[in-house]
Amino acid sequence: MKLTNIKPRLATIRTERVRSTVDSTSWRSGKTTAERGYGFRWQQARERFLSDNPLCCYCQREGRVGAATVVDHREPHRGDQRLFWDESNWQPMCQLHHDSDKRREEGQG
């Protein structure tokens, strides 16, 4: 008995990456994540900070308990390494508050 080929039933989809646009006047423009300071050293510091501060400070203000997954800079560092590494400028946040309330406070959205 001869087997016949079965036509694929799934359509081919395009999988190109969408590049985010960064204002060309921004301090981030043309820099990789590592070049902006978020390399291995940051990942280690971030993990330690979140281990010591596991709850979102914004959730706590609202009387809720939410897990912090982001280390936010209270005052945006805009490439200033002194401000970037100043732990008194860090705060633990959940992704939701970081991407909504904090962004709105900074006037970015």
Image: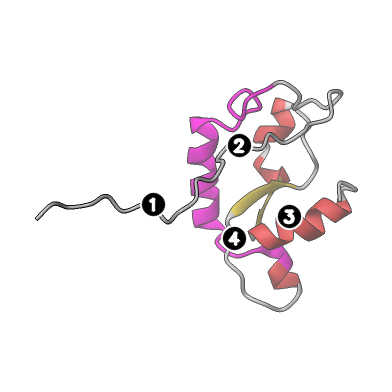
Q: Going from the N terminus, do you reach mark 1 or mark 3 first?
A: 1
| Label 1 with label 3: CB-CB less than 8 Å | no
Q: Viewer-proximal residue, 104 or 92?
A: 104
Q: Is residue 56 above or below residue 64?
A: above
Say which of marks 3 and 2 sits in front: 2
Where on the picture, by quarter, is residue 64? bottom right
Task: Please state if 16 lies on the left or on the right of 12 as rendered.
Answer: right
Tally of marks? 4
Residue reaching furthest right?
A: 107
Image coordinates of residue 60 in percent, x first then y, are: 69, 71
Q: Circle 2 is placed at which residue position?
A: 17
Give x and y (percent) for residue 58.
73, 65
User: Distance of mark 2 from mark 1, alpha carbons?
Assistant: 25 Å
> Which residue, given by chain and number where applicable, does mark 4 sit on?
68
Q: Where's residue 77, x and y in %? A: 77, 34
Q: Secondary structure at mark 3?
A: helix
Nearer-N-terminus badge (1/4): 1
Indicate left or right for 58 with 38 as reference.
right
Q: Earlier in the sequence, mark 2 or mark 1?
A: 1
Q: Which residue is mark 1?
A: 8
Q: Nearer the viewer, mark 2 or mark 1?
A: 1
Span highlighted in magenta in the image? 31-58
